[in-house]
Image (tube, grey):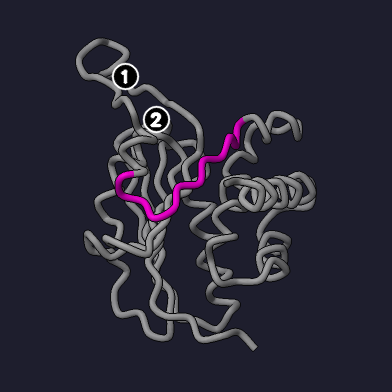
Amino acid sequence: MMPSIPLTNVIVAGVGGQGILTAAEVLARVALEAGLEVKKSEVKGLSQRGGSVVSFVRFGPRVYSPVIEKGTAQLLVAFERAEALRWVHFLKPEDNAVVLNDLTVVPLPATLGLDTYPQDVEETLRQVAGRLLVVNAPAVANRLGNPLVANTVVLGAASTLLPFPEDLWQRVLTDLFRRKYLEVNLQAFAEGRRLAHTSS
């Protein structure tokens, strides 16, 4: 029987084309399968690829709203470095964690010199995060032969910080992914968990 799980707020953030909504959907289904109430909402940027994308996932015994207020999130899962900074102020002041994909996607305004890409991202996050877990998901995905599973690597790392057993995650992944993509996604998920467990 699953232990009692309090109301938990998770922010999944990145840019278009990274599989943000898929990762949030997996998390939401895992929480549902665990017998919890779940509410999920998302905001997509103006550009399908390259624009900011964020999904709020809330689960617990009772969830009244899909909206996460500033200062109340326990976990931020960031698929891109600058997007982590965009949402870090939503974290609780204490008992929080950040999973950061080690990826930089420079937006067009910064490329054109109209804006600047933020520097010292990890240092800034460390000032706020109770735990910062940095994952080089693109390198793992490339090693597995499919760059598109980087999101599943990040999700695997994040899963180690959430109160659900590994076999439940695997069951949801099996239900969600088509057979031709299932094995590589299960491998990516396992690699993400391994990286999290070996990270200092």
* Residue 148 placement: quadrant: top right
Outermost residue toward the top in this view:
112
Between 58 and 193, which is closer to the camera in this rendering?
A: 193
> How far, Cα to Cα, is label 2 from label 1?
9 Å
- Residue 177: horizontal and vertical position, in percent? 69, 54
In the rendered image, the quadrant that contains the N terminus is bottom right
Tell me whether circle 2 and circle 1 mark residues in contact (CB < 8 Å). yes
Residue at the spot of label 2: 50
The image shows residue 124, relative to residue 66, as above or below, that is: above
The image shows residue 151, relative to residue 143, as above or below, that is: below
* Residue 57 placement: quadrant: bottom left
The image shows residue 109, relative to residue 192, as above or below, that is: above
Instruction: In the rendered structure, find residue 108 and report the number of the disc placed on it.
Output: 1
Range shown magenta: 127-138
Outermost residue toward the bottom in this view:
1
- Residue 159: horizontal and vertical position, in percent? 58, 59
Element type at marker 1? helix
- What type is the residue that disc 1 sits on? Leu
- What type is the residue that disc 2 sits on? Gly
Between 63 and 81, which is closer to the camera in this rendering?
A: 81
Question: Could you tell whether 15 is left or right of 36 in the image?
Answer: left
Question: Residue drawn 43% across and 50% down?
Answer: 98
Question: Could you tell whether 54 is left or right of 194 in the image?
Answer: left
Residue 30 sits inside the magenta stretch: no
Question: Residue drawn 65% across and 45% down?
Answer: 195
- Residue 75: horizontal and vertical position, in percent? 41, 58
* Residue 97 placement: quadrant: bottom left
- How many neighbours does mark 2 have within 10 angstroms: few (below 14), some (14-19), or many (20 or more)? some
Which badge, 2 or 1, is on the more N-terminal residue? 2
Task: Please give the count of numbered marks on the rendered protein.
Answer: 2
Question: Residue drawn 31% across and 62% down?
Answer: 94
Element type at marker 2? loop
